[in-house]
Image (cartoon, grey):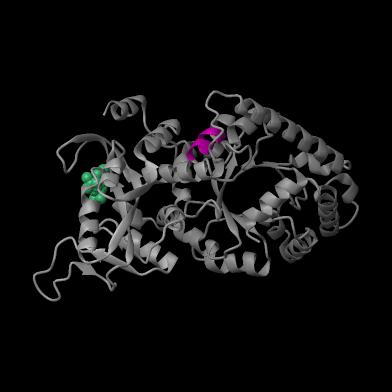
Amino acid sequence: MQFFDKLYTNITQNQSLLFVGLDPNPEMIPSRYRSQDVITGLGDWLQFIIQETADFVCAYKPTLGFYQALGIPGLELLYKTLAAIPSHIPIILDAKHSDLNTSSIFAHTVFAEWHVDAITLSPYTGQDHVAPFLVYPDKAVFILCCTSNPGAETLQQYPANDSPLYLQVVKEAKNWGTPEELALEVGTTNPEVLGLIRAVAPERTIMARSIWAEGSNLKQILEAGLNSNGDGLLIPVPQDMLSNPNLSQEIQSLRAEINQTKSQINADASSCSVWLPDVHFEDQQLQNDLILQLYDIGCIMFGKFVQASGATFPYYIDLRKIISNPQVFNQVLSAYEKIIRNLTFDRLAGIPYGSLPTATGLALRLNCPMVFPRKEVKAHGTRKVIEGNFAPGEIVVVVDDILISGKSVMEGAEKLKSAGLNVHDIVVLIDHEQGVQARLRENGYRSYAVFTISQIVKTLYQAGRINDEQLLAFTES
Ligand SMILES: O=c1ccn([C@@H]2O[C@H](COP(=O)(O)O)[C@@H](O)[C@H]2O)c(=O)[nH]1
């Protein structure tokens, strides 16, 4: 079972956002386990924690460093601890791995031999360090984006408070893996920090750390960290609670407090003025996330841009950049695919050059033949207008990037039609609106868009990516 399915099944079954650290820390061992030798005492304590908590938590998080520090017996203790965890509860190994050279072999050890479900990684070595962990389809990674360690402040906040490094880490990490592969680890006592990260990553699961350090500000932490579905946040059981002989009762009270606060927050949110009852939130969130990612990789630019028609727009969309980012490209293809799957057709066609990679990706995904109308016809060789094989009379769905006036896509469709193909449907990523779909309809084409430009602008404004001035320039255009 995929890590996040396992995690969310457990969250629902145990009604719990709580996860427990399974750390054999000799300094924290309760006195009742001290009479035995260290390893036995630590082992008995960990078994006690698992027994007391298994019905009330969503995940366990053993920290590798504590086991390594105990030498060979420590590793044996890790195997014993992993074996004692009920198989339906996901295990997040806290390794904060950060070495590129050992990433492939370490990924094999933890996922294929130890069978843990997820691992924490440090982000500094970048995507190529993370990739070897993502080749295991049912597993996941948690990227450390922020720690509460005061000594990390100067790095994390660099270069300035309005664009700190930890937010850049979040933006970058989102490009490394999908929300089904990659989550975030956030250590902070400050709900504001958690809120900023949630705004940048509305779709990601966040594992909160260190939230109890400054007493209980549970409500603010939950308000800042929960996603718009009222979940997506994992809460640590405080370390000192794990020494308590009445652990099971303590943990149930904490779970009840969290669930009650969460219900209150969700109830308050449902009476707020922007509540949209007809929106399917999961889809909406994926769409919003894709918009933010497109913006973050530079596909959506604001400023004054002259279009082919001579008109000046307050933005320019360059979707040709998507191909340089496989993770975003994959999500873009999924968005097109959702629309195209409902259409009836024999072939796909991409409009050159910008939409050829998209059409190729979709043709491979849908196992569907592809053609394309040439932009310019060669003066030599076959002098073909249409590339690829086809039979006249077949139905072609045309794929393009953005509709402004509709001129380029209609030119392409006309070339296909003059070769005897039928074109009824045009699918694009972005509809510039201002009547372009009606214009296509007048010319005999049905058109479908993943996003409208006003939806994009609204999402970017709400997420703080564009300011009042940029919003105004758009609404006045
Ligand atoms: O922001 C923009 C605007 C235009 N393009 C390119 O133009 C065509 C769409 O323009 P039509 O007027 O509909 O022909 C689009 O395929 C792009 O190639 C753009 O990339 N970004």
Relative height, residue 157 to residue 53 (above, below) = above
Q: Which residues fall within the magenta stretch?
A: 194-200
Q: Please give the count of numbered marks on the rendered protein.
A: 0
Q: State the image coordinates of residue 44 (x, y, percent, origin top left).
A: 86, 55
Task: Determine the image quadrant of residue 215.
Answer: top right
Q: Is residue 199 magenta?
A: yes
**Left or right position of 229 against 447:** right
Q: Is residue 422 left or right of residue 338?
A: left
Quarter of the picture containing the C terminus is top left
Q: Quadrant of residue 68?
A: bottom right
- Residue most toward the left? 379
Quarter occupied by residue 360: bottom left
Residue in the foreground of this view, choosing between 326 and 454: 454
Height in image: 68 above or below 460?
Answer: below
Magenta span: predominant SS is helix
Which residue appears at 49% of the width and 65% of the height?
101
Q: Residue at x 13, y 65 (%)?
A: 377
